[in-house]
Structure formats: C-alpha cells, structure tokens
Amino acid sequence: MSKAFVTLPQADRFALINATLAGITVEDGLPSSQAREGLVQADLIIAGGKIEAILAAGTAPADLPAADLSNAMVWPTFTDMHTHLDKGHIWPRKPNPTGDFMGALSTVKADREARWTAEDVATRMDFSLRCAYAHGTSLIRTHLDSSPPQHRISYEVFADMREKWAGRIDLQAAALFAFEEITDEAFFTDLLQVLKTHGGILGGVTLPLADLDHRLDLLFRAANDHGLDIDLHVDETQDASVLTLKSIAEAKLRNGFEGSVVVGHCCSLTQQADDVAKATIEKVAEAKLAVVSLPMCNMYLQDRHAGRTPRQRGVTLFHELTAAGVQTAVASDNTRDPFYAYGDLDCVEVLREAVRIVHLDHPLDETARIVTRTPADILGRPDHGRIATRAKADLVLFSARSWSELLSRPQADRIVLRSGQAIDTTLPSYRELDPLMES
C-alpha cells in the first residue's frame, strides 16, 4: 500500500474535517450557497462503520479523534454499470489485429470458443474485480457472452463470484447474445431459465433486422413473463442509417413494459439529422429508457480506418439526452480485450476521459453523478453512489482539492474506505495472469 496523504484515526468513531464533497453526491444536502463548481466543504462523522453526521465545515466536536483533510475531496464509492468481466484481460493472448469493431468480434469469438473454461473466466473475472475494488468501486453490472454453450459456463462462474465478493462489490449480470439468436426457441428458453436461476438480466446486441419489431416484442414479452429487466447494446456504429434506438423505445411502450431498460452505446445517434435525432430522443425520454455511454471503448473502435485520422468521437448525444430528462451515465465497458486494449476498471479514469471526450465540464457542478448516484439509481441500488447519514462509510478520499486537481492526475494516492476502514489499494500484478496467456 502506498503511503497515504493523510493519517486516519484508529478509532471506531472519528471525524473527517475540512473535506470537499461533490454536492450532487450528498443525499442529505448542504446549503447550496456553499457550492463552488458544485463542491461543498463539510465535516463527516464516522461511527461504527457508518456516516453518523454530515456537518458544516469546522463544526465537528473538538473532542473527537479527527483527520484534517485540508480541503481534500471525499467521494462515495463508484458504480460501473456496463462492463465485460468475462472478456477482461485476454488481449495478451488474443489482440485485435485491426483495432476495429469487426476485428474485435471475430477475435473474441475465436478466443471464447477455444479458451473460456470456467477456470479461465473465473480467474480473469476475479482479477478484474480486485482492480475495481482497489480503485473504489462497490457496484458493477457486467455483460456475459451468452451464445450457447457459454451461457451455462459463465453464469455459474458469475454466481460463485457474486457470492465470493458479497459485501465488497455488489454484482449484476446481463446476458449478451446476437439478436438473430432470439428466434432459436431452444436456446432462448434455456437462457431464460439460466437468468431466472441466477437473478440475471435480459440483454442482447440489437441489429437493424427486417423483423426487428417482432424480435423486440419477443424480448419484451419474455422479460414481462419472467420478471426480468433489460440491458441492450444499441447502435454501436457510425453508420447514420442504423438507428434501432427509437424502435426499442417504441417496443417498450407498445408492450407496456414497466421494468428497467438500459441502452448502451447509441453511437449512430450523433450521425442523424437534427430532426431525426430529436424525435428519437423524445421517444427515449417518453419510454423512460436509461442511456449509458462508453466513451473510452467507443473512441477506440469507432471511425477507425488504417492510415486515416478519426473524424468522429464515437459517443452518443449525451448532453441532448440529459437535457430531455433521460437518465445518463458513463462506464468502463471493455478492459484489455479486443474491444478495448486498455483500461483498469477505474471509474476515475472513466470520469476523467468522459469529461474530456464528451465536454462534461463548464460547468462541472453535476458531473460527479455520472459514475456515482445516477448509475446506482439506474441499477436499482440507491444505497450506492451517495454520501448520506446512516449509510455505510464507503468512501474514496483524494488528495485533490478541486476539479482541476482531480481531473489532471490519476489519483494514485487515493484512500478507499469500506465501512469506515481503509482497505489495501495495491493493484494485482498482471504477472498473475501469465499462465492463462500461454498458447
């Protein structure tokens, strides 16, 4: 563990004084007049592993053991709502030869069919979770490749991992399969049984098929019948002719589906004419879809052509969706696999890159929500992603005192508290994975 920038009291009840909080993450609220770029100063009282009180700065009881943060930032732990833990870290053995989307699809398929045993998936998944935990994440949704027979292998691994990590990282899993497979009755029936058994989420990669509406109706009816939420990969392309997003919103309304529906990527929305995009966004808002943007992965894959500088950023219309009242968030997506060669499941990196790529600044007042309270709310876990009295003291402390300081460095000296106690933030060595990379 690296040397901490502040020494925390060794006591069951103590104070963090002169802290800087992102006001949007504070459940109990502080006077808005104190805010500067959405940041507020406060004292926190920690007792028995929970937040006992959130006080105005400088008002904590003088007789309490205390750590003076000197305006250092305190955040709630993070929610990473769209990941691929089953794919993670296969890059060394199966790199993407072209760096584009089609290269990623074919490369992952080859690796999955040849190497994804229960042991292989479990080892890589656990490694990924140790990285996320050390970085300060407490809630993750992963998509699991579910084309047969992988759904039977990976969901068993996931169920074991969810139990192993209980109390440290809460885990959810959505089935990922090509939409052509939804009409394979034997497979789809079996998949639904697996999801019911393991508390999974119905997902899929939607495609602009001729009978898309019929397939969407099958999806929503199955979700209704089995009490499942839905999380879809949507329009992950810069092709302006591809826009299934509106069809999904219409299908949710048409089927009277009242469960949660998340749509990820939605990249081609940026290529639509303004009136077309506006109509789609209005329908998304009406249907109450939640949208997650994956800026790092989409910047990597989209508009990639050999020998040509990319013209497009690859992200969705984040500002316009948010302005329309749509719940919006960002997440890691892939990590060191053919869909994204980099990443470490660090929501600080995701936030920093999203701010730059999507211009989520000027102002920054509510930007903290996109990796904290909003994704937690979308995932139905409002016990995550906020600082609140009586809540667990699951916090991330940064030496940074301002947005500029936070977003300018990796924050490698962060302190992660779980139930009020600092955890070991040492990251696992990639060398642990070497035996899996041998051919």
Image (tube, helix red, strand yellow):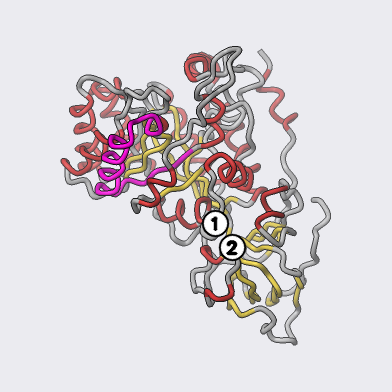
> Residue drawn at (62%, 73%), measured in percent from left and top?
48
> Residue drawn at (63%, 43%), measured in percent from left and top?
349
Q: Which mark is residue 363?
A: 1
Per the image, label 1 sits on a secondary structure element best described as loop
Q: Amino acid at mark 2?
A: Glu
Based on the picture, tell me whether residue 249 belongs to the magenta stretch: no
Of all residues, the one furthest to the right in this rendering is: 3
Q: Are marks 2 and 1 in contact (CB under 8 Å)?
A: yes
From what the image shows, is residue 125 above or below residue 107?
Answer: below
> Residue drawn at (64%, 18%), measured in percent from left and top?
93
| Residue 218 vs residue 386, the one in the foreground | 386
Coordinates of residue 272 in the picture (x, y in percent):
34, 30
Q: Which mark is residue 37?
A: 2
Q: Amino acid at mark 1?
A: Pro
The magenta-colored residue range is 268-293
Asked if residue 118 lies left or right of residue 177, the reply is right
Toward which corner of the image does residue 56 lie, by quadrant?
bottom right
